[in-house]
């Protein structure tokens, strides 16, 4: 059995395995996984020979309730590299059980990706960040207050080195991938920050007091996704690069209410930059 599938608790393994068995013979395998956040799904237009399937058609998948998230799995070639793309994700704020929310990420991992680029739309906490800019995620602070992986893995705290398995990465976000991303930014003329992402429950945007707290905690950007997926990817030994697209300054007193529409609109601005960056990044991946 697939080594990653074997690490999932049996009931979840069955569910994930069913989706994997449905997707694999249809050609949905790839070297690199991409998880595309709010307003960023258009990257799939840059793929050659793309094939797509709606989440609704995949056994066990739940369709997303966020209108701008298409909810499709797409496979194709980007800059010569085979990628497997989650165009749309499920969010903690949808209130689904973790095994439902994380099913697509588990499936992506069990389809054999070596690394994943996890993207999101985020509010800028760092005063130097301007909407339209991108941030490489160095690390995150998961403010959900519970670990989404509880009860999902056979061996929740595996030994550092298991026989026959490569050394486990020590950090949630792979340092070599982050460096490659920064180099790709320089090459493609896309300015990049590097910082810490705060993952909040949502769906409400943060209060002024919460923004102050997150700044004091050392966070540079805030959003409502990513951390749960990254923890699962790491547990399954998938190397992770994280990218936040800064769509707005985190809301403060005197600013108009943030709407999801504003976030999506600014996401449209940054998505071309993100596409340029990814097309410079993907060919740098070995193997
Ligand atoms: N807060 C939380 N999530 C977000 C934001 C924000 O300011 N912008 C985009 N997603």
Image: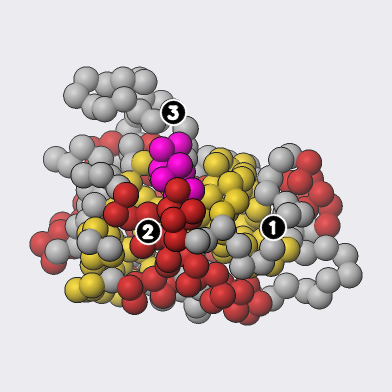
Residues at marks 2 and 3, CA–CA distance in whole angstroms:
26 Å
In reply to whether residue 181 is colored magenta, the answer given is yes
Identify the residue shown where x is 43% and y is 72%. Answer: 41
Taking the image as drawn, is residue 251 in sight?
A: yes
* Quarter assignment of residue 237: top left
Q: Secondary structure at mark 3?
A: loop
Classify 66 as above or below 30: below
Identify the residue shown where x is 44% and y is 28%. Answer: 170
Whole-percent x and y of residue 73?
A: 30, 67
Q: Locate residue 26 relative to residue 201 in the image: left or right.
A: left
Q: Can you tell which of label 2 and label 1 is closer to the viewer? A: 2
Q: Tell me which numbered mark, 2 or 3, is placed earlier along the sequence.
A: 3
Whole-percent x and y of residue 182?
A: 48, 48
The residue at which mark 2 appears reads as 280
* Quarter assignment of residue 216: top right
Taking the image as drawn, is residue 18 in sight?
A: no
Q: Nearer the viewer, residue 242 or 66?
A: 242
Q: Locate residue 69 relative to residue 18 in the image: left or right.
A: right
Residue located farthest toward the right when viewing the structure as drawn: 254
Q: Residues within 10 Å of mark 3 (few under 14, many from 20)?
A: few
Q: Tell me which numbered mark, 2 or 1, is placed earlier along the sequence.
A: 1
The residue at which mark 1 appears reads as 129
Q: Locate residue 125 relative to residue 82 in the image: left or right.
A: right
Q: Nearer the viewer, residue 65 or 264?
A: 264
Residues at marks 2 and 1, CA–CA distance in whole angstroms:
23 Å
Q: Locate residue 194 relative to residue 254 in the image: left or right.
A: left
Q: Nearer the viewer, residue 100 or 118?
A: 118
Q: Can you tell which of label 2 and label 3 is closer to the viewer? A: 2
Q: Nearer the viewer, residue 22 or 34?
A: 34
Question: Could you tell me what secondary structure mostly forms the magenta stretch?
Answer: helix
The residue at which mark 3 appears reads as 170
Q: Which residues are magenta?
A: 175-182
């Amino acid at each position: 059995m697939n080594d990653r599938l074997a690490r999932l608790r049996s009931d979840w393994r069955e569910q994930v395995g069913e989706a994997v068995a449905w997707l694999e013979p249809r050609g949905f395998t790839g070297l690199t996984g991409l998880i595309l956040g709010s307003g960023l799904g258009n990257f799939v237009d840059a793929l050659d020979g793309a094939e797509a399937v709606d989440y609704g058609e995949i056994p066990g998948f739940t369709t997303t309730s966020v209108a701008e998230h298409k909810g499709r799995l797409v496979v194709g070639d980007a800059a010569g590299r085979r990628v497997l793309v989650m165009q749309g994700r499920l969010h903690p704020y949808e209130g689904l059980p973790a095994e439902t929310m994380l099913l697509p990420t588990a499936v992506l991992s069990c389809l054999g990706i070596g690394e994943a680029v996890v993207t999101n739309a985020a509010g800028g906490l760092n005063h130097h960040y301007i909407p339209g800019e991108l941030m490489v995620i160095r690390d995150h602070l998961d403010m959900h207050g519970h670990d989404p992986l509880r009860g999902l893995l056979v061996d929740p705290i595996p030994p550092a080195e298991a026989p026959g398995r490569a050394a486990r990465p020590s950090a949630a976000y792979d340092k070599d991938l982050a460096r490659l991303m920064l180099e790709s930014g320089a090459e493609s003329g896309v300015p990049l920050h590097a910082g810490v992402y705060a993952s909040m429950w949502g769906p409400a945007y943060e209060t002024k007091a919460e923004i102050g707290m997150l700044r004091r905690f050392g966070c540079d950007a805030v959003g409502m996704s990513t951390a749960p997926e990254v923890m699962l990817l790491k547990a399954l030994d998938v190397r992770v690069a994280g990218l936040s697209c800064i769509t707005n300054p985190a809301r403060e007193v005197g600013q108009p209410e943030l709407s999801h529409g504003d976030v999506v609109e600014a996401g449209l601005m940054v998505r071309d930059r993100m596409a340029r960056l990814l097309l410079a990044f993907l060919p740098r991946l070995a193997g």
